[in-house]
Amino acid sequence: MSMAALNIFTRPYSPTASSLGPYDFNHHNRFNVSSCKLHSLSPRKSNNRTSRLYQIPTHFSKSGSGGCSWMQNNSTCHNTAAGNDCSRQGELYSVFPTKPATVSSVQDLFEFICSGPLIEQMGLTPEKVSESIDKWLAYGTQLCRLFQLNELYLTVPQKARFYHYYIPVFLWCEDQISQHRSMFKDGEDIPPLVIGFSAPQGCGKTTLVFALDYLFQVTGRKSATISIDDFYLTAEGQAKLREENPGNALLEFRGNAGSHDLPFSVETLMALDNLTKEGMKMKLPRYDKSAYNGRGDRASPSTWPEIEGPLQAILFEGWMLGFKPLPAEVVKAVDPQLETVNKNLEAYYDAWDKFIKAWIVIKIKDPSCVYQWRLQAEIAMREAGKPGMSDEEVKDFVSRYLPAYKAYLPTLYSEGPSGSNPKHLLVIEIDEGRNPILGY
């Protein structure tokens, strides 16, 4: 039987302040397989990384009643034309095949996980994967819930996105947080670990951060997400920047170094760093890209989400995080207009990068992918009823970023971000489909 027998249909779920907290994966028989007769699994010889015999755990938890929750029909959700009549309390509702899954389907999932391109880089062996297979299953289910996917019909790319990408990166982040927290003594205030995500536009970094933040919430860790977009100048500030740099297309619109409110970003990051106690609250700034027909403006503070401490992680993402200033002659050779941008970049380390203690760099082979990815994002925005840029406007918009990609990405990939430590840096190369093909 195929791996699909493992899969379950989960109700779409969005975390709220009232429903989040430490998540009991064994509640209502979740992932308790004490009565599932699973035997030793032998990874197929076609995968040279998993050529020996390993034992999948037959008892994943110490609590809960017996039964394999993904193998029984316990549906309590009734679909109607008007929608799903399901509980809104965050419980898991599933439709299961009536025929129990065979051992081969567990083996298929185990092998699929072990074949991922990030496994070796993260120091995960098949033995370690087998020991934590319950977590992999639980996280996979939660991601299907978050993205409103039917696990019975996940495509191979969707499975790869979850089990080869999001979950391994989440485990890496958890390890980084543990290392960070171990540096402090009992009773000390522990500032949240700032994890930087540097990746070109449209490659899926925002969705990755969204998934990671959700997994942190359901596993009991408090996290916050911010983007360099949240620190763009207001529409008024951007207009002033444009007036001060007449004829420089790279600074005509938001995006390049110089178009951010750096004092505002420092103020925000320092406030987040101090969010170490229960009851401490603050609002996270947000940017409205749809304002002014796609030119954007800072969103009204009344719409900013509020977070409460103590935070354990801050997920900070942006297309140019970690870029380093280069010699003037180098950037002028790429594009003379880049010289001013390069000079502006000198202030960014103190405003952003020095706060980041762990880095994830998403690497692409060809920056030209950015145009197609950005176009897809704008089309989705328009289909959602929000004003977005036209196809021609997208082409013009992306063209203003390409010189920076050409100038700064090679150094980012070869040397890492400014001030980064190789022990706290994960580089993930992705293909045109935004799926990982290599990690180092």
Image (cartoon, helix red, strand yellow):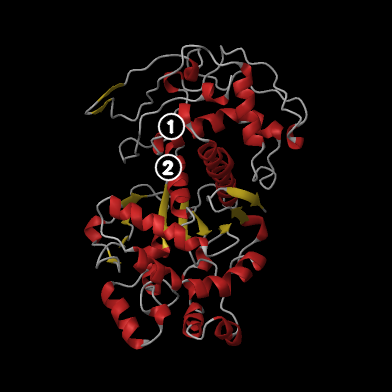
Instruction: Tell me the tag on residue 214.
Output: 2
Instruction: Tell me the tag on residue 23.
Output: 1
Does dot 2 land on a helix, a strand or a loop? Answer: helix
Residue density around tag 1, few if under 14, some if 14–19, many if 20 or more, within 10 Å: some
Residue visible at 50% across and 64% down in the picture? 355
Residue 201 visible in image: no
Instruction: Tell me the tag on residue 386.
Output: none
Does dot 1 land on a helix, a strand or a loop? Answer: loop
Give the percent coordinates (x, y) of residue 438.
65, 51
Residue type at mark 1: give it. Tyr
Residue visible at 40% across and 20% down in the picture? 95
Quarter of the image that includes the N terminus: top right
Quarter of the image that includes the C terminus: bottom right
Left or right position of 371 against 176: left
In the rendered image, the vertical position of residue 7 relative to residue 354, given as above or below: above
**Which marked residue is nearer to the observer: mark 1 or mark 2?**
2
Rendered image quadrant of residue 411: bottom right
